[in-house]
């Protein structure tokens, strides 16, 4: 009985956005995924225009406060970077039902590879190369950046 009370208490504390996810038919889910993918593409376009640096880089280490990391640069898509860079970020984590809601979440794991957008000396986005099925793929993001003239062909 205590577990049931805790379950209801936790459900009452859930963000409204999470409660709005709802149940959808396959067709509705595919349509919602297409709309969200379009939103992710628009975010990439905006970030690419604003970023001074875009790199594909492997995280080497993360600070104890989880607000900075060192990266081994594997490719430069915009701007100029040394073979290793140390970068900081600010902000928290946003939770929602659509990948676009958490598009700016930054959670760096040593050993993982990311597309990193930097503006004003801070990471704006660090999109992992390995992504979920309903997210803009790494390959799609690279093609989009090339089409925007931000990456070498």
Image (cartoon, rainbow, N blue to C red):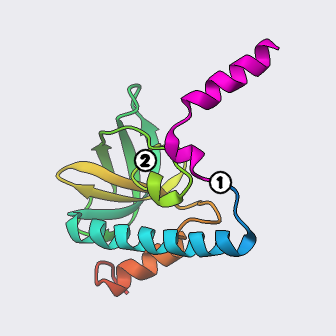
**Among numbered discs 2 and 1, the one appearing first in the sequence:** 1
115 with respect to 7 (left or right): left
* Total marks placed: 2
Indicate whether 147 appears above or below 19. below
- Considering depth in this image, is 125 or 83 the residue closer to the camera? 125
Secondary structure beneath label 1: loop
Question: Which residue is located at x 43 percent, y 40 percent?
Answer: 93
* Residue 60 image label: none
Q: Residue at 50%, 56% (x, y): give it.
A: 113
Q: Residue at x 25, y 48 (%)?
A: 122
* Label 2 CA crowd tier, 10 Å (few <14, some 14–19, many 20+): some
Q: Nearer the viewer, residue 95 or 65?
A: 95
Q: Position of residue 41 (x, y in %)?
A: 41, 73
Q: Position of residue 81 (x, y in %)?
A: 26, 60
Nearest the eye: 114 or 18:
18
**The quarter of the displayed image where residue 52 is located:** bottom left
C-alpha separation, residue under disc 2 versus residue under disc 1: 23 Å
Local packing at callout 1 (Cα closer than 10 Å; few below 14, some 14-19, many 20+) is: few
Q: Nearer the viewer, residue 105 or 9?
A: 9
Image quadrant holding the N terminus, namely top right
Residue, far left: 120
Task: Name the quadrant containing residue 147.
Answer: bottom left
- Residue that numbered label 2 is attached to: 105
Q: Is residue 93 above or below residue 120?
A: above
According to the image, label 1 marks what residue? 22
**Which residues lie in the magenta part?**
1-22
| 144, above or below 91, in the image | below
- At mark 2, the secondary structure is loop
């Amino acid at each position: 009985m205590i577990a049931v009370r805790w379950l209801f208490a936790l459900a009452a504390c859930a963000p409204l956005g999470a409660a709005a996810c709802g149940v959808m038919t396959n067709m509705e889910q595919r349509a919602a995924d297409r709309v969200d993918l379009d939103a992710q593409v628009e975010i990439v376009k905006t970030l690419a225009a604003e970023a001074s640096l875009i790199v594909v880089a492997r995280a080497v280490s993360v600070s104890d406060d989880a607000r900075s990391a060192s990266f081994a640069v594997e490719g430069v898509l915009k701007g100029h970077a040394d073979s290793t860079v140390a970068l900081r970020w600010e902000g928290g984590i946003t939770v929602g039902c659509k990948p676009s809601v958490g598009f700016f979440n930054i959670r760096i794991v040593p050993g993982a590879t990311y597309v990193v957008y930097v503006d004003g000396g801070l990471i704006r986005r660090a999109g992992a190369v390995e992504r979920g099925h309903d997210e803009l793929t790494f390959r799609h993001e690279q093609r989009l950046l090339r089409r925007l003239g931000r990456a070498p062909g």
